[in-house]
Amino acid sequence: MARIIVVEDEADLRDDLVEYLDRCGFEVEGASRGAELDRLLEAGPADVIVLDINLPDEDGFSVARRVRASCSAAIIMLTARSGLIDRVIGLELGADVYLVKPVDFREVEAQIKALMRRMQKGAAPHPAAEPSAGMPVPAAGPTSAPAHAPADSRKVWVFDDIEWRIQPPTGSAVPLTATEYKFLSLLVAAPGEAVSRQDISVTLTGRDWDPYSRSIDSLVRRLRIKVEERSGCALPVQAVHGVGYAFVGPVVTSAVEDSAD
């Protein structure tokens, strides 16, 4: 059963939403502020957090940033702020969905169910050996190929480092955020080789990797979902146990692609 935490300082709205989601079959708990959310997360992980922005002790943007760095829960921002800037900030900080009050509880339910389906689909583990950092990763199926192997151009991914997009072999190109672009830049620079979590963390945040942080895994999960939803292709980014991540499909950068034309 999915565990949902509703963080909302308006008691009536919080209680009504908790009661509604409980009737929908979820395990639901309510919190009125960021500190209460922290205590609930210490007691156990959540699958989805429904988060208000206007909280008495800490604004929801700050909470979202902190939560995203420490756990892999999906975040639904539920707020009265409808401005474009607020939406962009919320999504850039890691929110998966941004809903504006007043909202029908049925829409919240539908978004939670959609997020659960995406997470279950995107969380399927890829079998992997445990090589040392920088060692080649074994091929992971028919779409994978060693970095040195000639690839059928119809099966090649194109990393566009000018327009900040990833183009799958079929389907539409997927635009990338700055964080997604930096992450994929590391991996496609050495396809088939594992990039350590330490190197990823330093590149993305300028800080050493925190073994207790799930921010990198959350980034990969969201990126996999985004690429598959928009293009219909599974992103060939593979977790390498004990090391980090690798891009295991044939890939070229836009510069190489252009020079080949």
Image (spheres, rainbow, N blue to C red):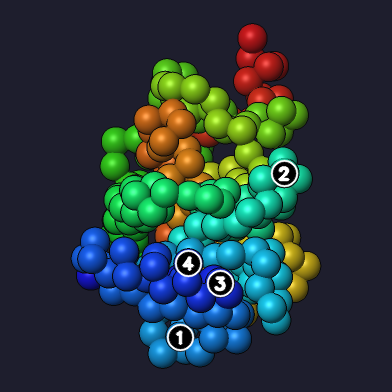
Of helix, strand and loop, which one carries label 3? Answer: loop
According to the image, label 1 marks what residue? 40
Q: Amino acid at mark 1?
A: Leu
Q: Earlier in the sequence, mark 4 or mark 1?
A: 4
Contact, mark 2 vs mark 1 (Cβ under 8 Å): no
Of helix, strand and loop, which one carries label 4? Answer: helix
Q: In terms of depth relative to the viewer, which is nearer, 5 or 126?
A: 5
Q: Residue at x 72, y 50 (%)?
A: 86
Q: Can you give x and y, in whole percent of width and height, for residue 3 in the image? A: 33, 72
Label 1: how many residues lie within 10 Å, few (<14), some (14-19) or many (20+)?
Answer: some
Q: Amino acid at mark 4?
A: Leu
Tell me if residue 9 comes above or below residue 100 in the rendering. below
In three-dimensional space, the C-alpha distance between marks 2 and 1, rounded to whole angstroms, equals 30 Å
According to the image, label 2 marks what residue? 83
Judge left or right: residue 193 versus residue 255: left
Q: Earlier in the sequence, mark 2 or mark 3?
A: 3
According to the image, label 3 marks what residue? 10
Contact, mark 3 vs mark 4 (Cβ under 8 Å): yes
Which image quadrant for residue 9?
A: bottom right
